[in-house]
Image (cartoon, rainbow, N blue to C red):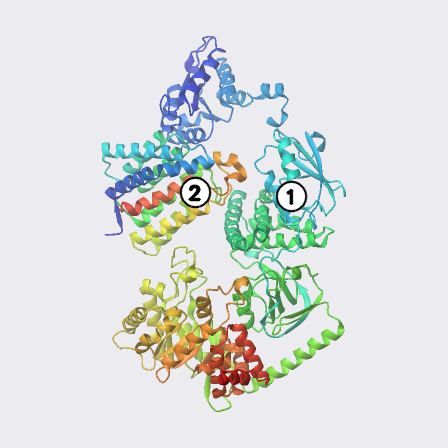
Amino acid sequence: MSAGPGALVGLVIVSHSRALARAAVALASEMLHDRPVRIAIAAGLDEVTLGTDAVRIKEAIEEVDGPEGVVVLMDLGSAVLSAELALDLLEDPEVRDRVILSAAPLVEGLVVAAVAAVGGAGRKEVAAEAHSALMGKAAHLNAPEVMSPPPRHADEQADVVAVFTVANRHGLHARPAARLVSEMRGLDAQVRLRNMTTGAGPVPAGSLSRVATLGALHGHQVQILASGRQAPEAVDHLLALAGRHFDEPREDAATPALLRQAGPLPASPGIGIGPVRMLTVAPPPAHLVAPESPAAEWRRVVEAIAEVRREIERLRAVAREVGPQEARIFDAHLMLLGDEEVLADVKARLNSGAGAVTAWMGALGVVEKQWSELPDPYLRARAEDVRAVGAQMVTALTGAAALTLTGPGILVAKELTPGQAAELDRDAVQGIVLAYGSPSSHAAILARSRGIPAVVAAGTGVLGFAEGTIIVIDGATGELVIDPPAATLTLFRERATQLAAQETRHRAAACEPACTADGTHVEVAANLGSPADARAAAANGADSAGLVRTEFLFLNRDQGPDPKEQVAEYLAIAEAMPGRRITLRTLDVGGDKPLPYLPMPVEVNPFLGHRGIRLSLERRDLLREQLAAICDVARQVPISVMFPMVSTVAEVRAARAVLEEAAGPAGLPDGLRVGMMVEVPAAALKIETFLPYLDFISIGTNDLTQYTLAAERGNAAVAALSDPLDPGVLSLIRHVCRAAAGRVPVAVCGEAAADEAAIPVLLGLGVRELSVSPHYVPSVKAWVRDLDVDRCATLAEVALGLDDAAAVRRLVASTLTGDDELSRHLGSAATA
Amino acid sequence: MDDMVSTAGLNQWIRAFAELVAENKDSLTDLDAAIGDGDHGANMHRGLQAAVAALDDTKPATASTLLNKVGMTVVSTVGGASGPLFGTMFLRMGAALGDTAEVSLTQLATALRAGLGGVVARGKAEPGDKTMYDALAPAVDALESAASTGVDKADALKLALAAAENGRDATTPMLARKGRASYLGERSVGHQDPGATTVALLMAAAIRAPL
């Protein structure tokens, strides 16, 4: 009954080393006592070169294949990948189907497999025998965890036990906990922690979400229970780390500010009174509820984690420039994204049929709830960290803004992305308080354009305010009072009433032209981003549309608008403002807001990159199409067109050439005016060379300011620098106005145009058109009517000689309030 | 048409890739020494020299025979995990292209997408694992979107290279979760991934060739 070798299972040994494979076969042969087993070696690239070769593995399988099939044993790494590839390379699917790749350890597995094979076992039996090859050795060495992981929370099995006392003033909150968890990574040890003071735990030390639930406060004693090969090292590391206060600075470890704050800073005028409201993650939209397979949903989660991780790492790099403490909060966020407990929970939820968003929110909701129930208020506030990560993940998973308000009131948040700010419900949000941010950030600009009072850079303390507590803010002064006494509340209510009365007065005269006290006409136009804005502008009395951001037609879609759609949208704007001139700016995008149909390389610094007219001239097809649509509209209504981000005359000439082409044989429409935006300081300085090609100039003070002062407008750390009233910026504006005087009109369409302090200076420099958010038109007109152009010119001259924007603001404030600092300046200038 | 890639172009691509790997062999090995077993540069160099020699011998006439030849040679001669991974990539690319002497940019992007699928199937890498995937996936994305919007070949390849280089750079802060680097845990953070680096060289080779 002895079977020939052809009826036995064949074995293939895959190893990086030919010598190792041969020795392993020799070792196994000792057990076989010359009984025949077919064993083939696929090991090393040659006698001495370490490596594995999928083609050789395939050949080896074919050599020993027979009716009973083949079991393949491998060492590590590429051996496994090459063996899998070898299966793909097998031409005969029947051969492939009778090959088993075994996860057994190479030497032990081979010995056991050879014995089983020679005894006539089938391939599944041989593979199963090989798989349990470590059993004997493990039993001998009493290491049960090799066979099955030890129960995770059984504390009686600790090899090493130690205790430390929490010396951090605010206990083991997210950041020191993250430091602790990272210290445990990569160590071959199971470490659990128990709060001996409260009895909480034990919890796995490798899980940030669980460590935080220990509620370990200053002075609490925490027990370390470690087992496994590196248990002693793990305990040593932990004790040393605890001794170093988990690398937190000892002074005021409690309130590490993300960035140096100059605030609270006024960001959008108006009075807000209402209960504190935090942002929470919105439930997933109904259309996202139908999940795919758990594997597909898991892949979505993994991809979203990678995306959020990249974003957090970017923020962390920014924060690190301020200091390592500021970066640490992001370490906690990153740690949450990789938290094994959280991910295991997500996976379990996916397997029970939940979609990626639901599973993620459910898992994080558990953590947030645990944290928000902790007794210490500082630790409790760290639930904010969980919310932040949760919101980022949901945004990454759905591509939507994920935050909503729990009810009407004053929104208190760490920061708002422009997307979040844009989606806020004006009726629910009675005011905004941001811990970070700057008055020149996009979020603040959006708040102003929507008339929502806002105070920014208020510090992280505001995040600890209890939801529902009454808070009052004055967005014109930056004042903010939590839980105000009755007298304060009355004071703010009176201010609100006065402001409302003033607004009513302004609105009553909004449709009249704005002429200064000495009779100079100033055009007050509106900046628009949609036909709805155009209707608001008309209702607010705007004299024209000074800037239409045509991006609204191009963003958030998979394909650009066709010419017909463009014509229809531009006409809709013109029809909302009948008889008034509409200034359309050509597409202004760059690496910071890429379009799916307009691929652009990722740039390190998109604001200094390939954007505005630079990009348009590269994609002339798009530009030509847009200009053709504009020409079409200009034949029906009064239209101006302007080009953004111009640096050289060649760009204007090239853009005009495209415009001529786009206009076609009929030539440029009568009445079409062509202009450019001045945002690049070099363009302002060279403005004379541009004039022959222009009908008008519009100064974009937001970008001009950030480029002139080298201060990014969204960055709170440089918020005070990024002020258009800096005399350097004013000097550029004066240069443009002087060169253009008597030749082409100069408008300002940045934020400065709606800034009560900036308007007298701009008029003094020679600006005669202000283009502002529709909401501001009535106020700007009212302010203009109170001014005297000659006096403004004197004011501007003095301002140009001052040190910085703050000095200019003081000068303007004293002049407007009648405290005549201006006369004193003039006096000192006269005596000098 | 200019935007077509000939078999001769693909041949030049592989040769340029071999040259770039040869030039960067030591730095690749240094990268691998920091987080792996230090053989990546030498392994890839050996495999690609063998691939070039095989191309000299057989002079394949179609895209698929060329890429199959390269894939099989790489699989047999690299030795480390890069062998089955890059090998599978080339084999899948070859299978996707079929017997044609010229391929369009779109076909090339589709083939690279198939190659990426092979890498994922073989290595089970996920985004952010600090592997060649993290450079290859963005490069394929970039090439596909460039091809679909009619960007010309030279620019499309530049976009793919930029995406690969960004992806490569992004591996530095990542925690390795695959291969021997994963044994290092946190200590793998702060080192650029050698596989992702080689992918960037592959994209640079397409420009050097030129394709």
Picture coordinates of residue A108, whole percent (x, y):
52, 19
Q: Residues within 10 Å of mark 1 (few under 14, many from 20)?
A: some
Q: Relative to residue B35, is residue A775 depicted above or below? A: below
- Residue situated in front as seen by the camera: A705 or A280: A705
Describe the element under mark 2 as helix, strand or loop.
Answer: helix
> Residue A341: x, y in percent?
62, 42
Which amino acid lies under the numbered mark 2 shown in the image of this protein? Tyr
Q: Position of residue A360 (x, y in %)?
A: 59, 49
Q: Badge 2: few (under 14), some or many (20 or more) residues near its Cα, within 10 Å? A: many
Determine the image quadrant of residue A243. Answer: top right
- Residue depicted at x 28% and y 39%: B15
Q: Is residue A777 above or below residue A624?
A: below
- What residue did someone put label 2 on? B133
Q: Nearer the viewer, residue A27 or B91?
A: A27
Residue under numbered circle 1: A244
On whether disc 2 and disc 1 are found on a single subunit, the reply is no
Q: Position of residue B87 (x, y in %)?
A: 36, 35
